[in-house]
Image (cartoon, rainbow, N blue to C red):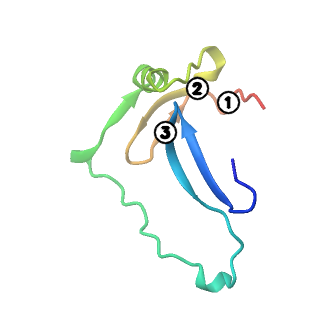
Amino acid sequence: MVQKGTGNFEVVEGGAAVVSGTVRVADNVSHERVSVEFFQPQTNDDLLEMSSQDIYKELRLRGYNYHGDFCGLVSLDNSGECLVRNRFFALVT
């Protein structure tokens, strides 16, 4: 939630603040740029792959309980590779 007047915000999960900051309008957008270090793919020695069972167990431990059609992830790894069961995911809006 963003607080009126100050623009301060805080994102809370499980009773703990995970992100906080300030929302503001930039005076000069060209001065607001930051340098970004792009993601470097992992080598095979550093590769960590998670199975579908591992993925959804980790999500359950974090309080997310997906079931049935909402479990479309087959595997993923820290190189950015992600395998899904179908081309489509079930989404609730």
The amino acid sitting under disc 3 is Cys
Helix, strand or loop at disc 3? strand
Nearest the viewer among 60 and 91 is 60
Q: Could you classify mark 3 by the number of other residues whose Cα lies within 10 Å: few (under 14), some (14-19), or many (20 or more)?
A: few
| Separation of marks 2 and 3 at Cα, in angstroms | 11 Å
Mark 1 — residue? 89
* Res 37 → quadrant: bottom left
Q: What's the residue type where badge 1 is placed?
A: Phe
**18 on left or right of 77:** right
Across and down, in percent, residue 14 comes to 52, 30
Query: In the picture shown, does residue 29 fall above or below 1?
Result: below
Query: What percent of the width, then of the height, locates residue 84?
Result: 55, 31
Q: Position of residue 11 (x, y in %)?
A: 58, 45
Q: Say which label, 1 or 2, has the lower sequence index.
A: 2
Q: In what element is the residue under mark 2?
A: loop
Q: Which residue is mark 3?
A: 82
Residue at (49% x, 39% y) in the render: 82
Mark 1 to mark 2: distance in Å?
A: 6 Å
Q: Which residue is mark 2?
A: 72
Amino acid tagged 2: Gly
Identify which residue is drawn at 52% across, 50% down: 19
Pointers 1 and 2 in contact (C-beta within 8 Å): yes
- Residue lying furthest right in this view? 93
In the figure, is residue 37 to the left or right of 65? Answer: left
What residue is drawn where x is 78% and y is 32%? 93
